[in-house]
Amino acid sequence: MFYQPNDVMHGEQIDEMMCSLGKFIVEFERVCSSLQHLIMFILQKEGLKNHQLAQAVIGDKAARELRTLFGTIYQELPNQDEDDNKTVKSLLNRFDKLTEFRNELVHAKWSLDKQTDEDGFTAILEKFKNKPTKGVIQKRSPITKDLIERFALEARKEMVLVRRLSVALLQSGFKTSEHMNRFPDCELDDELFEWLKA
């Protein structure tokens, strides 16, 4: 539905939110791209000589399919112990939540009416979901520019972790869990994913 901002400030707030949304989407896709490259390099390291075949395996998989493919390939790698498995599982769980947030943003109806409070402009995401025990339910979720930017930062942290995982898996002398947990700069913002439960 076409709408007009109520005033110049409202229009600027909407534009800022859309810029944050674009930033998040790009950061999210960079995580996906890092996973794609990691899968290709693992396949090559494990003996696949045909680069095009690696591309065919990855294809145009969406985020969840990419996560499943990587998780399956990772389980077949030698020399990964229980600590390594926990570390990689934690990363993939974070990626699942990031994917869920991305899907909530992309597949929702955005209400951008004037919704300003002490924290600034708030948009409302609306989505209908089918629940076998409840029928059709409507989910309405408030979202702010700050929240989107926090998720963009989470995506950047996950990209860094995927790159560290690449180093651990593709170069000799690195233990996966130790290398990925060596730096405290990519800790999860525990409150961040509470938004998904609302």
Image: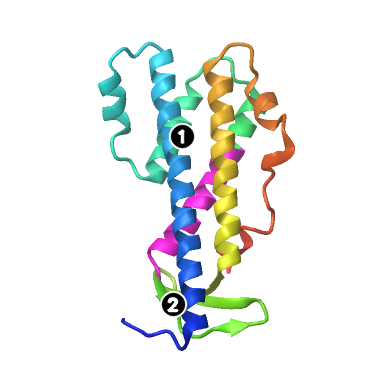
Report which residue position mark 1 lands on.
34
- Closer to the chain start, of discs 1 and 2, is 1
Residue 107 point in image, percent of width and height: 38, 64
Under mark 1, the amino acid is Ser
Q: Is residue 118 magenta?
A: no
Seen in the picture, residue 130 relative to 187 is either above or below; the reply is below
Residue 67, position as x, y percentages in the image:
44, 39
Q: Residues within 10 Å of mark 1 (few under 14, many from 20)?
A: some
* Residue type, mark 2 in image: Gln
Q: Is residue 85 left or right of residue 56?
A: right
Quarter placement of the N terminus: bottom left
- Checking the image for residue 94, the label placed there is none
In the image, is residue 13 above or below residue 36?
Answer: below
Q: Is residue 157 above or below residue 36?
A: below
Residue at the spot 28% in from the left edge and 16% down from the top edge: 50
Report the predominant secondary structure element of the magenta stretch: helix
- Residue 140 seen in render: no
Find the magenta span and give its range: 90-108
Q: Relative to residue 176, is residue 72 drawn left or right?
A: left
Dot 2, crowdedness within 10 Å: few (<14), some or many (≥20)? few
Q: Give the foreground label among 1 and 2.
A: 1
Q: Quadrant of the C terminus?
A: bottom right
Looking at the rendering, which quadrant does residue 172 occupy? Answer: top right
Residue 106 vertical position relative to residue 40 in the rendered view, above or below: below
Residue at x 54% of width, y 39% of height: 159
Give residue 138's mark: 2
Q: Position of residue 37 (x, y in %)?
A: 42, 29
Disc 1 to disc 2, how far (Cα)? 35 Å
